Image (cartoon, coloured by chain):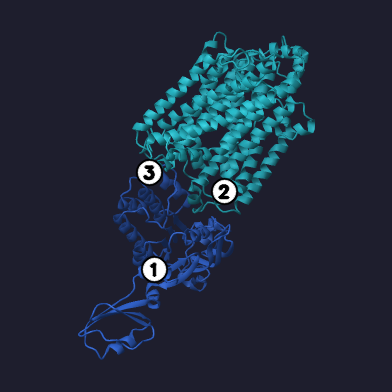
Chain colours: A cyan, B blue
């Protein structure tokens, strides 16, 4: 690569530094706490064996963590838990990194500027890809070091992290292709994240349905499982993600060499008959702009909730010893030995997901300010409180919709499969997603007023850190008061436990107070462009 | 708020000073350690077309952001129609329409949808006039904003603002992306606004535009207003050029206050005169002249004088 390419690569790498650091941190911590936590929770071989035959052997659990080849050893457990969970995060990372480095730069007009200089398209693309590879290398090292620090072997740790990284690489390839197909960052992200969600669904089926194990060979998530770190490694499985990465990148390069800069391959409508609905107020127009992604969120949540509801029917207490039940409860998963217990456990993930959704809403508000459309709005007779208040109301309403859909769909799936659960219980589980979401939304509003550029990151970071805190605390059997600092410790496992009204009131109050402060403080600051 | 929508009647002239469309007092803005605007005192009267001149970075956009209340003054105050720009932006903005130098609109909306959104939020849009402007600016309103060139996006913002018939138009380098034909349409539209009695605050660095449109001009330099007045006043304060061709070789005149002479060939001299030309004419009376031309300074010369000459 020539000097221009090197400069561009360095620039792209620096541009991604915060995302790289955040994922590296997440991967390192997660890879470290799993072996440590497992040793603490299951100190004896007998306890580990008990865990393996009951908890890990359960179909409904595999839907989240993938297929456990050997959950009776520390290393095998980690290969399953770390590999299975981080692979999903790695898929998201790959898409984000590729779309940002390729499509977002182009959409902002910077690629055109670069190509106006003595820089070939191949060089510009190569530089972006080199920067992505550099970022993935760091995240790989972080995960390997985390496992190593957790007491796993060097070679095994490196190989486990490699298995996770193949997912990131494959989805970076898919993201790169999506960035060539879609003409906008938003469109490319939707394609890439959609592909990741589809892969997750295929993995869930492959790991749970009888006779569907071959489906593991269909997705990067399955290939990472088939590499089988610590459990009879099969490095030949590396060929599949390597081939997919090479294929998608090759296709992306071929398209990039031929198409007009600033356009995509997918047809876009440049002209349209005016549709004048939802243009009456800033909030209505925000809803109009978010309608597409809101539909995707709703569909995704509904689909996963139905599947999980159906799977819940396979849960039974038979074969799970009392000792293991207690251990599982200590893992922070509640009493997961009945269909409703399983649903309660599953809903933790909806709680996290919908809390993260609050982050996307803060990000959308910030986007409108960074793009300076907000200045256009505020030059009209629109007050800041009305604008931000409308945005927050829209976010809260959308979150409530997602929560209701999750509850309803889980109920529908579970009752269709013969689980004894009432619609009210399902909706209660859905409603249980809201207190923390509203709290994070309120904190996001406050962050938006005080540190606008970092506001979405504050929400994503807080949700992730408090959730990890909760997991770590439960795993390490940390002192109560320490674990109770995180909101997740105060959320009841609905529907197997009851909704904790007191805690919910506290969380909603925190959210409302923060939002009120945010609304007040937003009026005292300058608008801040990107 | 109902009262604030009303246009001041002729009988309310007494209160007019306080209700000037734009008034700032000691308006100052700092960004960190950078002083972007330094104690600006500005007053734009009703029906006036005010040209706000200054090079890039002089503080023009900062002034407009403070007038719109999207940025907060570090010191001093800004008022629109007597309403504090920071504290009462919503009431003020009912009477204002704004066009930014770079139009930030919603890429996924078409021109027509953008008009609908902005009109419904602002209120009081003259739909017939808007349709007429669309025609005159030759805008395709069914195209999405993201498919429009910069100039065409600028047209969307301009048409939306002009069609509100707001009492005050705040225009921040509104013609930056327009071609000469559209620039002419823009000038017509501003003349129409003037005839309707709208006040126009036109920030620009296109001097010919300001010269053609504005009643009064303010020149901003590094955050300070260094000169202000009607074009005639600015010219009066500035030097004018008198070129004289003599029948014989140019004589050496005795030194005159406010006059500097410069040879412009064997028989010709160019005089730069500050103030009255009377003394120079008297001094020239004894000589036989072939020609005498006098030229007032262009706005460009006044502007450059402030910037090159240290103003």
Q: Are marks 2 and 1 in contact (CB under 8 Å)?
A: no
Q: Secondary structure at mark 2?
A: helix
Dot 2: chain letter: A
Task: Quadrant for the N terminus of chain B, please.
Answer: bottom right
Q: Position of residue B161 (x, y in %)?
A: 42, 54
Q: Quadrant of residue B189?
A: bottom left
Q: Nearer the viewer, mark 1 or mark 3?
A: 3
Q: Quadrant of residue A75?
A: top right
Q: Nearer the viewer, mark 2 or mark 3?
A: 3
**Residue B125 position (above or below residue A512):** below
Q: Residues within 10 Å of mark 3 (few under 14, many from 20)?
A: few
Q: According to the image, label 1 marks what residue?
A: B304
Q: Say whether mark 1 and mark 2 are on the same chain.
A: no
Q: Quadrant of residue A108?
A: top left
Q: Are marks 1 and 3 in contact (CB under 8 Å)?
A: no
Disc 2/disc 1 C-alpha distance (Å): 45 Å
Dot 1: chain letter: B
Q: According to the image, label 3 marks what residue?
A: A117
Work out whether mark 2 precedes mark 3 in sequence or the reverse, and give the earlier one.
Answer: 3
Q: Residues within 10 Å of mark 2 (few under 14, many from 20)?
A: some
Q: According to the image, label 2 marks what residue?
A: A386
Task: Quadrant for the C terminus of chain B, please.
Answer: bottom left
Q: Say whether mark 3 and mark 1 are on the same chain.
A: no
Q: Nearer the viewer, mark 2 or mark 1?
A: 1
| Camera-side residue of B205 and B101 | B205
Q: Secondary structure at mark 1?
A: helix
Dot 3: chain letter: A
């Amino acid at each position: 690569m020539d000097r221009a390419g090197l400069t561009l690569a360095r620039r792209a790498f620096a541009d991604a530094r915060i995302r790289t650091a955040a994922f590296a941190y997440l991967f390192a911590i997660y890879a470290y706490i799993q072996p440590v936590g497992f040793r603490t929770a299951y100190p004896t071989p007998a306890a580990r064996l008990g865990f393996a035959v009951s908890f890990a052997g359960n179909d409904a659990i595999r839907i989240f963590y993938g297929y456990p080849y050997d959950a009776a050893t520390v290393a095998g457990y980690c290969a399953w838990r770390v590999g299975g969970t981080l692979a999903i995060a790695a898929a998201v990372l790959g898409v984000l990194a590729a779309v940002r480095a390729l499509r977002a730069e182009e959409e902002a007009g910077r690629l055109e500027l670069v190509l106006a200089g003595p820089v070939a398209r191949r060089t510009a693309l190569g530089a972006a890809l080199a920067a992505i590879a550099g970022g993935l290398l760091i995240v790989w090292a972080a995960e390997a070091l985390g496992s190593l620090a957790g007491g796993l072997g060097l070679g095994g740790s490196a190989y486990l992290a490699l298995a996770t990284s193949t997912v990131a690489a494959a989805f970076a390839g898919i993201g790169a292709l999506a960035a060539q197909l879609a003409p906008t960052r938003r469109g490319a992200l939707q394609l890439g994240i959609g592909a990741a969600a589809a892969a997750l669904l295929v993995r869930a089926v492959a790991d749970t349905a009888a006779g569907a194990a071959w489906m593991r060979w269909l997705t990067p998530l399955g290939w990472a499982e088939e590499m089988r770190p610590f459990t009879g490694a099969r490095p030949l499985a590396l060929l599949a993600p390597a081939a997919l990465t090479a294929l998608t990148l090759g296709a992306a390069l071929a398209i990039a060499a031929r198409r007009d800069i600033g356009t995509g391959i997918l047809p876009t409508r440049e002209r349209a008959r005016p549709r004048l609905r939802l243009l009456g107020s800033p909030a209505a127009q925000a809803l109009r702009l978010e309608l597409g992604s809101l539909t995707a969120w709703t569909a995704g949540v509904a689909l996963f909730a139905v599947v999980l509801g159906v799977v819940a029917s396979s849960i039974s207490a038979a074969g799970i010893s009392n000792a293991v039940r207690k251990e599982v409860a200590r893992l922070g998963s509640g009493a997961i030995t009945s269909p409703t217990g399983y649903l309660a456990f599953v809903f933790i993930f909806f709680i996290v997901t919908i809390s993260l959704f609050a982050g996307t809403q803060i990000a959308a508000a910030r986007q409108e300010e960074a793009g300076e459309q907000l200045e256009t709005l505020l030059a009209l007779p629109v007050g800041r409180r009305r604008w931000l208040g409308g945005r927050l109301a829209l976010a809260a309403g959308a979150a409530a919709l997602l929560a209701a859909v999750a509850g309803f769909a889980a109920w529908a799936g579970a009752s269709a499969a013969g689980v004894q659960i009432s619609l009210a219980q399902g909706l209660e589980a859905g409603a249980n997603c809201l207190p923390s979401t509203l709290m994070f939304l309120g904190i996001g509003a406050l962050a938006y007023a005080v540190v606008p550029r970092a506001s979405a990151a504050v929400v994503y970071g807080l949700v992730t850190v408090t959730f990890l805190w909760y997991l770590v605390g439960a795993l390490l059997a940390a002192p109560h008061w320490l674990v109770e600092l995180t909101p997740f410790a105060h959320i009841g496992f609905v529907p197997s436990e009851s909704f904790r009204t007191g805690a919910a009131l506290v969380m909603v109050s925190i959210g409302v107070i923060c939002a009120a402060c945010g609304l007040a403080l937003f009026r005292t600051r300058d608008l801040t462009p990107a | 708020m109902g009262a604030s929508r009303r246009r001041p009647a002729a009988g309310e002239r007494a209160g007019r000073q306080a209700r000037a469309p734009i008034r700032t007092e000691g308006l100052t803005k700092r960004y960190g350690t950078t002083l972007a605007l330094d104690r600006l005192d500005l007053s734009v009267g009703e029906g006036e077309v005010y040209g706000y001149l200054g090079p890039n970075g002089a503080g023009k956009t900062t002034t407009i952001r403070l007038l719109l209340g999207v940025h907060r003054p570090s010191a001093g105050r800004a008022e629109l129609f007597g309403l504090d720009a920071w504290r009462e932006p919503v009431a003020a903005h009912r009477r204002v329409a704004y066009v930014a130098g770079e139009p930030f609109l919603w890429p996924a909306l078409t021109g027509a949808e953008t008009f609908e959104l902005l009109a419904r939020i602002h209120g009081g849009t003259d739909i017939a006039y808007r349709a007429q402007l669309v025609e005159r600016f030759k805008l395709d309103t069914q195209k999405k904003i993201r498919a429009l060139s910069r100039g065409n996006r600028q047209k969307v913002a301009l048409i939306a603002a002009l069609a509100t018939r707001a009492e005050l138009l705040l225009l921040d380098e509104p013609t930056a992306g327009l071609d000469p034909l559209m620039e002419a349409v823009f000038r017509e539209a501003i003349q129409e606004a003037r005839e309707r009695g709208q006040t126009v605050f036109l920030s620009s660095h296109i001097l010919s535009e300001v010269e053609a449109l504005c009643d009064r001009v303010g020149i901003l330099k590094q955050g300070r207003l260094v000169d202000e007045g009607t074009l005639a006043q600015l010219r009066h304060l500035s030097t004018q050029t008198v070129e004289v061709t003599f029948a014989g070789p140019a004589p050496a005149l005795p030194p005159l206050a406010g006059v500097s002479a410069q040879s412009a060939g064997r028989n010709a001299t160019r005089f730069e005169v500050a103030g009255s030309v009377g003394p120079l004419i008297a001094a020239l009376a004894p000589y036989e002249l072939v020609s005498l031309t006098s030229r007032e300074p262009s706005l460009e010369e006044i502007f450059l004088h402030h910037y090159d000459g240290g103003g």
